[in-house]
Image (cartoon, rainbow, N blue to C red):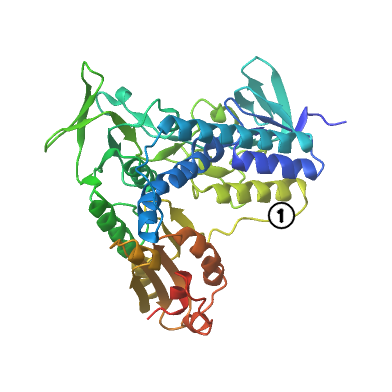
Amino acid sequence: MSDYDFDLFVIGAGSGGVRASRVAAAHGAKVAVAEEFRVGGTCVIRGCVPKKLLIYGAHFAEDLKDARRFGWNVPDCGFEWTTLRDNVLADVDRLEGLYKNTLDNHKVELIGERATITGPHSVKLASGREVTAKVILVATGAWPIIPDVEGAEHGITSNEVFHLDECPGRIVIVGGGYIANEFAGIFHQFGSHVTMVNRGNTLLRGYDETVRDRLLQISTMKGINFRFNAKMEKIEKNEDGTLCVRFESGDPVAADLVLFATGRRPHTEELGLETAGVELDEKGAIKVDDYSQTSCESIYAVGDVTDRLQLTPVAIREGHAFADTVFGGNKRKVDYGCVPSAVFSHPPLAGVGMTEAEARNTLGTVKIYTSDFRPMKNVLANRDERALYKMIVDATTDRVVGLHMIGPDAPEILQAAAVAVKAGLTKQDFDDTVALHPSMAEELVLLK
């Protein structure tokens, strides 16, 4: 008979928490998971999944227009935000049900309450119930950061954007990261007048400079406005409900909606971590070792709350590795090298491995191969928009150390190519592969 109520108690039923729960249960552990909101976490409920569905919807704006060049007699079409919104939210409900079924099928007890840590082996639920566990896993994710400016309460974050009553005529998006660029593309295609406001002069810091510059060029050509080095002073709400965004310098911008996309902070506040001596870093993230163990030996943490790499597939791997290590007798850690990522902007971009700047700083001598082309569909559609593929190669070994792309279906193409980069294949290996013609992906084996 165990001295604890559970072998594992998980706080947070997002991607990492759910994976850890079901794998630990499959190893024979008695598991409970507490979730104060909805099962599925940021990705399923208010992130990747609903956002990607909005992106699919946004693409129809250009697809319908392009169809006329391909012989289709497409009439002028109107867009109804509420139809798309409701269908997206219904699919989120469906997915949440599948996540709940997964937990139920693995006999994981789902507790729909907030849980706080009261000691190395104990938690307290919002209802007042005290629970003990041999191991506690924190998987509470991250939360949007709201800038400290006057009138910030008039803006929203990506948490609320999926529930809007109507599509804004004018939207100001604050930030320059992937969330900001993705929603800029979405709302522009829905017909909104989009202004992106960035306090610095760089979009998508961390992505290859050539690719992100191409996105800026294309976005500007499409009609998205950019304000760089713009420090917000305040947001004013007018009597008619519209907003006015004022800056320390430069003209104000009128808007119907302000969306903050200024980063995400690990969600560690008021979790009671200090009661068990769990250490945090300067950003509030939980410090963990290679096996996701915190400074308290009975408490672990995975996913965005650790701020190692804020990506859903990484959280899932961390949760799986934790469960195998602690309950499966298979001690293993996650490999964070060559993790591919994408920005579902319009057009999308994707990358894996080193950027050109990183490669030059790390390796010294590199070779750069590129293909700058107009996709076949864009040619017939009479669009000037060009795709760009870039390969970074270690000049001393011929090994491909980075691939970066922008253009239609770039993330879909990069996923397969990332296997080659992860495996350490060479430029010659790419050259030796026969092109699949006609396709955009064939450019990867024809790079000069």
Q: Is residue 16 above or below residue 440?
A: above
Picture residue at 75% right of the left edge, 33% below the top: 104
Indicate the amino acid at tag 1: Lys
- Residue 250, image x and y in percent? 11, 38
Q: Locate residue 436 relative to residue 99 in the image: left or right.
A: left
Q: Which SS class for mark 1?
A: loop
In this rendering, would 228 be left or right of 49?
left
Where the N terminus falls, by quadrant?
Answer: top right
Measured as percent of width and height from the top left, residue 336 is found at 54, 58
Q: Quadrant of residue 107?
A: top right
x then y, percent, for residue 409: 46, 59
Callout 1 environment at 10 Å: few (<14), some (14 to 19), or many (20+)? few
Residue identifier under label 1 = 331
Q: How many numbered marks does the figure carry?
A: 1
Quadrant of the snapshot with the C terminus = bottom left
Residue 313 spot, x, y in % from top left:
57, 50
In the displayed structure image, the side of residue 394 where residue 2 appears, left or right: right
Residue 226 is at least partly visible in this image? yes
- Residue 296 image-quadrant placement: top right
Q: Measuring 32% from the left and 27% from the top, which residue is drawn there? A: 155
